[in-house]
Amino acid sequence: MLTVNDLMTIIPNTVTPQSTLRQVIEVMKTQSCRQLPVLENGKLVGIITDRDVRLVMNSPLILHGRWQDEEILDNITAENCMTPDPVVVSPDTPAYQAAAMLSSYKFGALPVVDNGTLVGIITVTDFLNHFAMQQPAMIDHND
């Protein structure tokens, strides 16, 4: 049976709760990722996504002019906008179950935790990559 361990990205990029939004964006940009586990003293405490960052930057609750964006980027931290205690899966979780969780919760990623330690992340893209490689002959490259 296909498991999360077969599809996940091992040793994902991470940030800390004290990472500024500027730092979070830089990691997302340079590492081409949209979700980052948030670790404190080696323990998973949250997950921050590109959507979380966009919501903070464009929040109607934070009335600001564009000139204040720099201040927000340098003073708002991952801890302020992450999802704390995220839903997680283990490496031996069946892949279909992880896919069902991503779909039903409308998540883009799930941290993978083994014995309390972050060991990976599984994303919608991991599933798409897996299925795209299953039948490469079926993909019409002439379009």
Image (tube, helix red, strand yellow):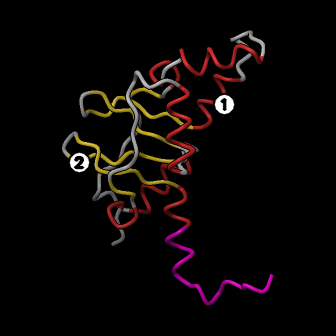
Percent position of residue 110, x then y: 43, 46
User: Is 136 in the magenta?
Assistant: yes
Q: Which corner quadrant holds the C terminus?
A: bottom right
Q: Which residues are magenta?
A: 129-143
Residue 30 among magenta residues: no
Residue underneath mark 1: 54
Residue 101 location (% of width, % of height): 48, 49
Looking at the image, residue 29 lies above or below residue 60: below
Mark earlier in primary sequence (1, 2): 1
- The answer to whether 19 is drawn above or below residue 108 in the figure is above
Q: Nearer the viewer, mark 1 or mark 2?
A: 1
Q: Position of residue 108 (x, y in %)?
A: 55, 47
Q: Amino acid at mark 2?
A: Asp
Q: Amino acid at mark 1?
A: Arg
**As rendered, which of 130 and 65 lies closer to the eye?**
65
Name the quarter where the N terminus is drawn.
Answer: bottom left
Q: Is residue 26 above or below residue 76?
A: below
Q: Which residue is mark 2?
A: 114
Q: Secondary structure at mark 2?
A: strand
Disc 2 crowd rating (10 Å Cα; few below 14, some 14-19, many 20+) is few
Left-right relation of 137 to 88:
right
